[in-house]
Image (tube, helix red, strand yellow):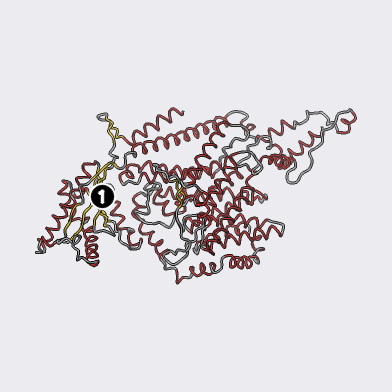
Amino acid sequence: MIGLCAVIAFLSALWSIYSVGLLPPSVTPRNIDVAAASTGLAVDRPRQLISDPLATEYDYESIHTRMVLLGSLMTSAPAMKYIARRAGLDSADITTGTRITAGVQRVFTEPDSERRADQIAGATKPYRIEVRPSHTLPTLDIYTQATSVVQAQRLANAVLPGMNDYLRALARKANARPDAQVRLDQLGPARGAIINGGTRIQIAGLTFVFVFVMTCLLGLACARARRRIAGSATPGAKARRRPQADRGLERACPQPAPGAALTPPIALAAAGVAARPPPAPAAHGGVAVTRRVADRAGDWPHTTRVLPWMIAFIMAIVWLVPFNDILLDVSLPIDLYLDRLVLPFIVAVWALVLATGGRHAPQLRMTWIHAAIGAVVAVACLSLVLEARALSQTLEFDLAIKKLTLLGSYVCLFVIVASVVRRSEVRVFMSYTLALAIICALGTILEYRFGTNVFYSVSDALLPGIFHIGSIDSLGLDEIGRRTVRGPTQTSLEVVAIMAMALPIALVRLLESPRMRNRLLYGLAVAVLIAATVATFRKTAFLAPISVGLTLAYYRRRELIKLAPLGVVLVLLIQVLSPGALSAVAGQLDRNRLGVTTVSDRTADYDAIRPDVWTNLALGRGYGSYEHTSYRILDMELLRQLIEGGVVGLLAYIMMVVAVVAVARRPIRARRSDDASIALAVAAAAVCFLVVSTLFDVMSFPHVPYVFLWMAALLAVTAAPRTDPAAAPEEHAATRPELAVRKELAWSS
């Protein structure tokens, strides 16, 4: 079956880069290569201003104004006819664009729905001219794109004569003197090259891997379904479907033969045979609890296993290190940030331990969370496979591959954690997460109060010189006058999101702690986390914790009501830890202050993305291909998922979060102490993740998906079916009365 899947994947990869004809039989390469050329034009007056010693600053400002006007005029339809005639092309095959580089607000340069529709319509044309006016020099940068280097250079060299022809035609039409028009000089001949040389191999490789994996999964699913159908039709299938634990217990505790009398323990003692004592009673399941306590001897942190320690190390990096601003200062084809240096090493060790096997090898537990995350990855890959050639022409395929690789790193962390962490270690790792979150919150509060980011300063002091660490201004202000307090993350919204997802751990522990001392400690932890979120001056600092509180209230409303008086104390602690921040954030929620750009820009995105959505409604334009520097900054992850993955991608993303909540629902309802508290905390974190996905593009900032998938993996460990055959009989004996009675009879006999 693997060979057949490989053949199908190879043919699909071949079809992605070659066009196969049947009549007559032929195989021709698809037109994937993109060539580009560049040149420059200097703008001057008829009497040279640059060499005039009497020129003033005002004269240069007027030239700059004319330069921007010429740049827009150069890409207009009338001017393009003259340029296309000089290049020997049809103007209908050329798309144009002008980028405004003057010092204006970003929102004024973002395309609206009409401009974006025009860009989409011209994306399929074989030729492109882009003009970029310089904001410091009286020059115009000309960039052209074609299917070959010669054509791109010819088109770039045709811009100057074509534009001069157009200006002379305008002068004659207006009865103006041709010698009085603006002077344009080309700054050397155009230079060109192929700019997407490795795209063909990337498209073929992505297609092969995707088709191979999907066909293998489809074959395994068909084989499993066939075995089930065949097994259900044979005699005794119902007996084989009995739980494995029941059969194991019956083998360990056989029923006495018919007519045989049970030998009482007194008779065995008289015969000199020591009777086997019954198991010592233990709370919550007898022998099962005793066995589970014995199994914890090798649990983290009291373990020599390497992988749990490596997982703890990378989570410390996620919470305490600005890894997305720490770049290895080495010239390589890809950007190596700190997490992308550590995670491949962990993946390699995990694969080695999994291949060697043994008692402590990772266990690949499959849950509905795995299936939902796999669906997100599958839709992302499928969207890129289908739109690969179109993205290659718009030079966005490389960006999409980088974003897909980043998505793969998120999923790798989830798979490793879900397979390495033991069920008995989950609670300890949740406590570890809460400790890291509190340290992160304290550092954020220090940044708010003293204007110093300890995460960046400590990283700069500890890391060697081969790492480049980004700069940060903790006293800087954004466009509406708010402080840029961001902790170890890239944006303030990011640090709010990760601390809000850690908040339910402290809240659940606060609800379930029977001792007053523990309640005080967890209450203080809640105050520290909320104080750190409001210290960022973001409205999300209210909305994200509220989503966590509503989720907890849905499942534990009675317990939460009892802690209502504690809310007054928490407000006072928050005011002490972050003075003035709480009232500043609350003031931003006033309806008279909701007209700021951070709100109006979000509402403008809904209309602006209509052309992208309707162009590729089902599967989108390709995962990771929507570059905010070229189009719009989408402050909403759901909109980005809709554009890049279509309706299918958006549903898969939402179902990933819904799957986490659905898996957590059963242990929450069962109210078993450890499982219920873990599931409740993760469910609240999942709801919080969905809420913040409506407030900013969370998948573009690695800290947020890392934390979310980390907690989802811990829930997957808790909810996965138990695979330890030695522990299963005792656990089932504690929950099945008839089997427990049978076992007691076996001991007494």
Q: Considering only vertical position in the picture, is 355 above or below 172? A: above
Image x and y of residue 689, in percent: 51, 54
* Quadrant in the picture for residue 437: bottom right
Q: Which residue is nearer to you in this view: 105 or 218?
A: 105
Task: Residue at the far right: name it.
Answer: 270
Task: Residue at the far bottom: name it.
Answer: 592
Q: Considering only vertical position in the picture, is 212 above or below 598? A: above
Task: Residue at the far front: name it.
Answer: 53
Disc 1 element: strand
Residue found 45% across the figure and 72% down from its top: 592
Which amino acid, mark 1?
Tyr
Residue found 67% across the figure and 36% down from its top: 245
Task: Find disc 1 in the rendering and name its residue.
Answer: 143
Q: Is residue 188 left or right of residue 354?
A: left
Q: Across the whole image, how many numbered discs are drawn on residues?
A: 1
Image x and y of residue 159, in percent: 19, 51
* Quadrant in the picture for residue 362: top right
Q: Considering only vertical position in the picture, is 480 above or below 615? A: below
Dot 1, how many residues are within 10 Å of its Cα: few (below 14), some (14-19), or many (20+)?
many
Q: Is residue 518 left or right of residue 493?
A: right
Q: Is residue 292 left or right of residue 81?
A: right
Q: Quadrant of the C terminus?
A: top right
Image x and y of residue 21, in percent: 28, 32
Image x and y of residue 204, in percent: 36, 36
* Quadrant in the picture for residue 25: top left
